[in-house]
Image (cartoon, grey):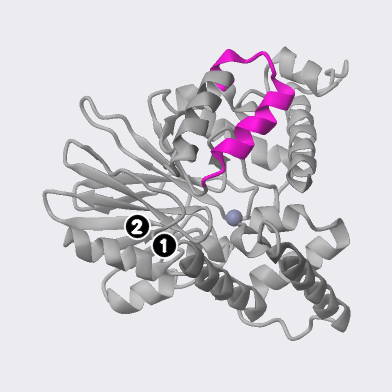
Amino acid sequence: MAPPDWSLTLAAAASFCGVLCLCLRFRAGRGLWREGVSKIMARTEKPLFRIAYTLYTKTRLGYLFYKRQMRKAREHYPAGHSKAQPVELNGVKIIPISVLSDNYSYLVIDTASSVAAVVDPADPQAVQAVLEEEGVMLEAILCTHKHWDHSGGNKWLKRLHGSCRVYGNATDNIPGLTHPLSHRDSVTVGRLHFKALFTPGHTVGHMIYLLDGCAGVPPSLFSGDLVFLSGCGRMFEGSARTMLSSLDTVGSLSEDTLLWPGHEYAEDNLLFATEVEPQNTARESKYQWVQQQRSQKLCTSPSTIGEEKAYNPFLRLHLPDLHKALGLQQLPDEDWTEFRARALEELRRRKDLFNRR
Ligand SMILES: [Zn+2]
């Protein structure tokens, strides 16, 4: 948790009250407390947003907001927001844990040694319940970034599991961090081998974790708030150029890689993708499947990187049809990467407008 910033102005505090008022207003309807920080911020105008974001990430107010979000979500979804099936492949068991209103934590177990790592334990009690059910020992917390809806349970679990290591990037102010990571560092838990990849943009120190595959078993990517099914995270703390480089890191992975994102946003994201690529048949068939899943509150993870490349507009920024849909053209002296970053900026702007509807 970040220390309170006592230099915050009264105006900033008043603005946060404005955000809280927004929360209360929406509570009667869809219930803003049920939404992740990305969606909350998407509803907030720019100057107000900066202040609210600072308060959320740098003061105790953010932590209190997260605690309230967790309490309300536990009341509203006593069995979790979605039903998820564990996947077991060659001695590796991956269990999506549905937490808060639309987040997923992931428990990854080496079944031979009964040791486990957890990715983004937002609600520590929900994670602890699964650890006890599985009878496994928690050796590591892999934290993608500092937002409370990903890192809020780190300290609670660390207190309970004294030898548990907490991984993340040092620039991101991860609560309870014990093992700072850099790009391409390795993390070993039992027979599980993860590679940490530095992917800033959503936050300054965002990391994603790639679990090695082995014979006949595909690798798994835990992507936090960088990439979702058919979407990407908001660029809270980085330029479009920075975010593009992080998205390119994901795009460079093998197509059979399983994608385990930090939120259940599939339905909304595919609806948005329909606006920019209405003729995309891969998107249409995935949307049909997602609608079926969500009608029964079933988890939509994992997809694969190959699938995402076929319909996720944020991984298709090199395609002329997408540029056309965005009304963009490469300028004569414009670098290709600069142009793709400009396309990303426009695509993200449209997605933010879409979220506000
Ligand atoms: Zn986030």
Image side of residue 267 versus residue 12, left or right: left
Dots 2, 1 in contact, CB < 8 A: yes
Query: Gap in Å between the C-alphas at discs 2 and 1?
Result: 6 Å
Q: Using the image, determine if residue 293 lies above or below residue 169.
A: above
Q: Using the image, determine if residue 270 lies above or below residue 56.
A: above
Choose between 248 and 118: the one closer to the eye.
Answer: 118
Q: Which quadrant of the rendered structure holds the C terminus?
A: top right
Q: Is residue 265 part of the magenta span, yes or no?
A: yes
Helix, strand or loop under label 2 = strand
Q: Which quadrant of the rendered structure holds the N terminus?
A: bottom right
The kind of residue tagged 1 is Pro
Residue 292 horizontal/vertical position (percent): 47, 31
Q: Quadrant of residue 52?
A: bottom right
Q: Is residue 10 part of the magenta span, yes or no?
A: no
Residue 94 horizontal/vertical position (percent): 29, 45
Image side of residue 332 versus residue 75, left or right: right
Residue 12 horizontal/vertical position (percent): 83, 76
Residue 245 showing in the rendered view: no
Q: Which residue is label 2 attached to?
A: 118
Q: Which residue is label 1 attached to?
A: 121
